[in-house]
Image (cartoon, helix red, strand yellow):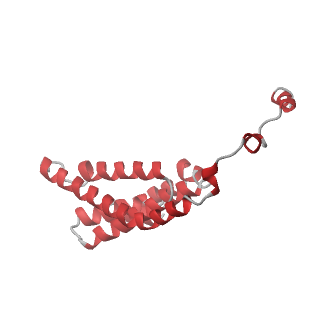
Amino acid sequence: FCFFYFFIRTLGLSRQTALFTSISYCYGSYTIATINTLNNLSTLIWLPAILCSLNMAVADRKPSAYFIAILFICSSILGGEPQLTTFTSVLILFYAFIVIPENKAPLKDRVRHSGIVVLLIFSACMIAFVQLGSTYIDYKNSARLRGLNFTDATYYSLPIDSLKHFLIP
């Protein structure tokens, strides 16, 4: 809620608009649906913070906001949902190319903004790799690499005699 509120305020919109959109973001169907999958929620919450810091860095020309954006992107990566992190990266690239520049901005400025975002994402990946690298080393010692035998994999499967419960509860 707070990140989205600050993002809307950095766009120059009113408090009421920021309040309404923040509530709709927090209690929207996708956010509520991700409560059961914490890795999705842990990645989703950083999107407005990334957009807010990116907007402050590029549009308001605050260089310190670039470092904050890197930390937020890194937190999103470490949230644990690679697909949502990829969607977030594509969205912030789109935001830097289309939304941040003024309407009549030349293509050179749009490409420069997008290049900055690519550099921010790359920097965040390098920082996150410190944690992900050690996780990979530990993963090589995991029992998950051995796989499951047929008995363990089918232990909780649906027994044949329970199929009748699909038709007669």
Residue name at image x 12 percent, y 50 percent: 108
Q: Is residue 103 left or right of residue 126?
A: left
Q: Nearer the viewer, residue 106 or 112?
A: 112
Most extreme residue toward the bottom is: 64
In this rendering, is residue 141 above or below 65?
Answer: above
- Visible residue check, residue 76: yes
Q: Is residue 162 left or right of residue 60?
A: right
- Visible residue check, residue 15: no
- Label count reads 0
Q: Position of residue 64 (x, y in %)?
A: 27, 73
Residue name at image x 55 percent, y 48 percent: 29
Q: Position of residue 82 (x, y in %)?
A: 46, 52
Q: Nearer the viewer, residue 50 or 71?
A: 71
Q: Is residue 155 left or right of residue 67?
A: right
Residue name at image x 51 percent, y 62 percent: 137
Q: Nearer the viewer, residue 29 or 165?
A: 165
Which quadrant: the C terminus? top right
Residue name at image x 60 percent, y 51 percent: 145
Q: Position of residue 18 (x, y in %)?
A: 41, 61
Q: Position of residue 144 (x, y in %)?
A: 62, 53
